[in-house]
Image (cartoon, rainbow, N blue to C red):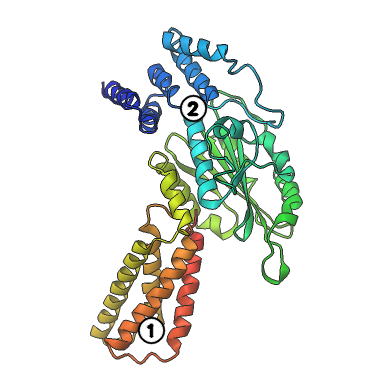
Amino acid sequence: MAENKRLQEATAVIRRGDKETGREMLLDILQMDPENDTAWVWMSAVVDTDELRLECLEEALKFNPDNQMAHRGIAKLREKGVGETAVSDASPTTPKLSSTITATLSYFCRRRIIEKQYQLLPNEFAYTVFSDSGLFDNTKFRNIPIVPFPELEPLLPYFDAILFRKGGGSFAVTCIKVRDAQKIDNVFVPQALFVEVGQACLRHAPKVMYGQTAPITFEILEFFERDFMPDDEKRLATLKRIPGRKKVMVTVLAIDTFSRKVRKNYQPGVAGLFNAAYPNTINRWLAEEHTFSEAETRRAVANGGVKWGSILLGIVGGIVFALAIEFLLLLFQWESGWVVDMIGAITAVLIAIYARKIRVDNKRQGIITAALYGVVYYGILLFLFGYWLGLIWIWNIGWMIAWGAFLGRVTDP
């Protein structure tokens, strides 16, 4: 009964012209009841392309073959020739995906593209989901087109979407695959292929200290719409790889689309042992799918990702925390040292990063917060408490800035 009421609310919102909100409400309904044929019909009214409309209507008929609205909608789309021709010869991948997972994948891609300036490799998913949306209109977004990259093309048959980024200190590739209960998919990419493709991409990798080439990083995100099997565990575990001499690193995350969380984390080295911040970032992204704002994120990117209100909050929080520790140490007549100052700086940086709704360019946010915190904190000690700081405070602020850069880097999505 509650689902029917929710569906009525969604259809009322769509009739008022608010398709974005209506789509989010329908996604929630379909997540709870994926066999709701009426919801699938309404979903066909709010997706962006005729191909996705056809897929929604076919989903409705799969659960209710007598749904006349779905039959009429499919007939109209067939008259337009939808679904009868291939998209492009440049599209060697992918089986059809459900509308729900398509929405999630397109959201992931949009977020990578907008926040991190990734580019999308051309395949059926890229053309179907994005070519009609205006996202890749070169007159508006010159730096994020759908771009062919020959060295990465050997991976296309294995994945539903592939993104890559040359810059930001690394050459990073994100490969996304859906494991669907409706399909038997025994084609798995071997680790050796990642090494071969990564070696071919090394000439595009940025240079780091002393002219060394930065490693190529492959990140594999597998979305499971079926049970996670022991064979999956073995297969994914064999893919992870530290850079080594060949400078190719492979990280794998298995994502459960039902719980919408990272189920297994296959990260090589120390990061894998301690389950570093990155899987938590993916969980946060999954939770934010229906509240994500492209316009707000673009504004944040245009502003360099720096949020001054969060920086101010972080500085105040860090100083209060550090001074409280200083006061407690004085009560017990213990000497305080630079460790207390550093704890306050770390607190300030973490508050400044996590207080933002949209976390873009955490590294810059961390560096600015740490620097301003150090100046303000030592200023308070100097002028209000009469501390003689000497030149050591310059050294300490330098360490604070280094910590700010490190925390920003490890918390960056």
Q: Residue at x 46, y 69 (%)?
A: 367
Describe the element under mark 1 as helix, strand or loop: loop
Q: Residue visible at 60% across and 15% down?
A: 81
Q: Is residue 224 or residue 372 the one in the foreground?
A: 372
| Coordinates of residue 107 in the picture (x, y in percent) | 49, 39
Q: Earlier in the sequence, mark 1 or mark 2?
A: 2
**Image: 94 above or below 236:** above
Spatial separation of the CA atoms under disc 1 and disc 2: 57 Å
Percent x, y of residue 256: 48, 37
Q: Residue furthest front?
A: 139
Q: Amino acid at mark 2?
A: Ser
Residue 146 in sight here = yes
The residue where tag 2 is placed is 99
> Would you say residue 67 is visible in this rendering?
no
Residue 77 rendering spot, x and y as whole percentages: 53, 15
Q: Residue at x 35, y 26 (%)?
A: 14
Q: Amino acid at mark 1?
A: Gly
Quarter the N terminus occupies: top left
Tell me the mark number nearer the camera, choosing from 1 and 2. 2
How packed mark 1 is, by other alpha carbons closer than 10 Å (few <14, some 14-19, many 20 or more), is: few
How many marks can you see? 2
Across and down, in percent, residue 177 comes to 59, 36
On the image, which quarter does residue 151 sit in?
A: top right
- Note whether 11 is above or below 76 in the view shown: below
Q: Secondary structure at mark 2?
A: helix
Residue at which label 1 appears: 337
